[in-house]
Image (cartoon, rainbow, N blue to C red):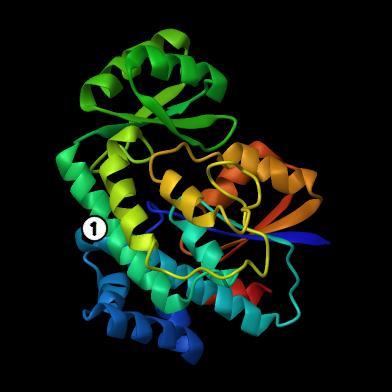
Amino acid sequence: MKRAIIFPGQGSQVVGMGKDLAKAIPECKALFDRANEILGYDLETICFEGPQEELNKSNHAQLGIFVASAAAFHALKLKQPDLEYELLAGHSLGEWTALYVAGVVSFEDTIKILKARGEAMQAACEENPGAMLAVMGIAGDDLVKVASEAGCHVANFNSLAQTVLSGTADSITKAEELVKVAGAKRAIRLPVAGAFHSPLMQPAADQMAVFLAQVDFSEEKIPVLSNVTAQPHGNTSVKDDMIKQITSSVQWVALVQRMVSHGVEEIIECGPGKVLAGLIKRIDKTVAVRNIGQITDLEKE
C-alpha cells in the first residue's frame, strides 16, 4: 500500500496538545524539553496548560504545533517501526514539519526557523492589518474571480467545498457581499490577526529570505510536496518555495489530488486536531485517512 504522511498548520492548536504523548513516551518529552532549551522559555507549559489565548499567538502556535506534530510522528514510528511511506506534505506551517521529517532541516534549525517565521508574520500583521474569510459552497476557480473583483486573494484551496480568501479588511468585506450574491452556502470570518498567504505578508517573506540564507538545507530523504506548486520540491528550489509560501495560495486540493494520482491509498495526519483529515475526505473519498495526535490514537493501531 502506498502511503503519505501529512502535518497540520496554524489553527490546529489546542491546549493539551502533545501532553499525553510526552507523559507516556520519553522520546516525545525530550522534544518538548529540547524546544524549551533552544527557545529559552517554557513552550511546553503553554502547549500543555495554556491559556488558549497565549497559545493562539502566532509564534507560540507555530512552534507548539510543530513540536506536537513531530512528537506524534515519532510516537507512530516507535509503535510501527516498519511503517513505509512514499510522500510527505503539510499545510502551510506543516510543510516545515514535513521538511524536518524528510531530513531537510534539523529539529534545532526548524525551531529557530519557526520562531523567526512566527515573529515575522506577526510583525507583518501589525504593519499590514488584514482579514480572512472561509467560503463554503463555491468552486475555487469561481472564487478566484470574486477575489479579483473584491481586491483580495485566495489564501487556501482547502477542499472542493471550502476556499479561504485573504486581504485587507475592506476587500474582505466586499468579498463577503460578492460571495452571497454568487450563492455561497456559508462564509465565515476567521479569527486571525492578518491576511496570511497574501501579498500583505511580503514583509515577512523578505525577512525569511534573509534568515533562510543562513540555514543549511540537506537533500530530501522522502519527497515533500510543495504548498506553492503541489509538486515535489526540487533540491534547489526548497528555500525559494518556502519563502514564496508565505505570500502564495496553499494548493491543498491539487496537492491531495497529486498524492492520489501517485497511487497513495492511505494518508496519515500526525499532529493536533483532524482538520486535514476532514478536508481530504471532501477532496477524495477513495483514500483512507487516519490521525495520530493522542496516545489513544496509537492504542488503536
Residue nearest the observer in this picture, 250 or 223? 223
| 152 with respect to 241 (left or right) | left
Q: Position of residue 48 (x, y in %)?
A: 32, 74
Answer with the quarter of the image where residue 37 lies. Answer: bottom left
Q: Position of residue 116 (x, y in %)?
A: 29, 62
Three-letter code for the amino acid on which mark 1 is drawn: Glu
Residue at (70%, 80%) from the top-left corner?
Answer: 80
Residue at (60%, 30%) from the top-left corner?
Answer: 160
Answer with the quarter of the image where residue 56 lies. Answer: bottom left
Answer with the quarter of the image where residue 190 lies. Answer: top left
Report whether residue 25 is seen.
Answer: no
Q: Secondary structure at mark 1?
A: helix
Residue furthest to the left: 126
| 215 with respect to 129 (left or right) | right
Residue at (39%, 61%) from the top-left corner?
Answer: 212
Residue nearest the observer in this picture, 10 or 217? 217
> What residue is disc 1 on?
119
Report whether residue 38 is seen.
Answer: yes
Residue furthest to the top: 181
Graded by Cα atoms within 10 Å as few (under 14), some (14 to 19) or many (20 or more), the crowding at tag 1 reads some
Q: Position of residue 5 (x, y in %)?
A: 64, 62
| 127 with respect to 278 (left or right) | left
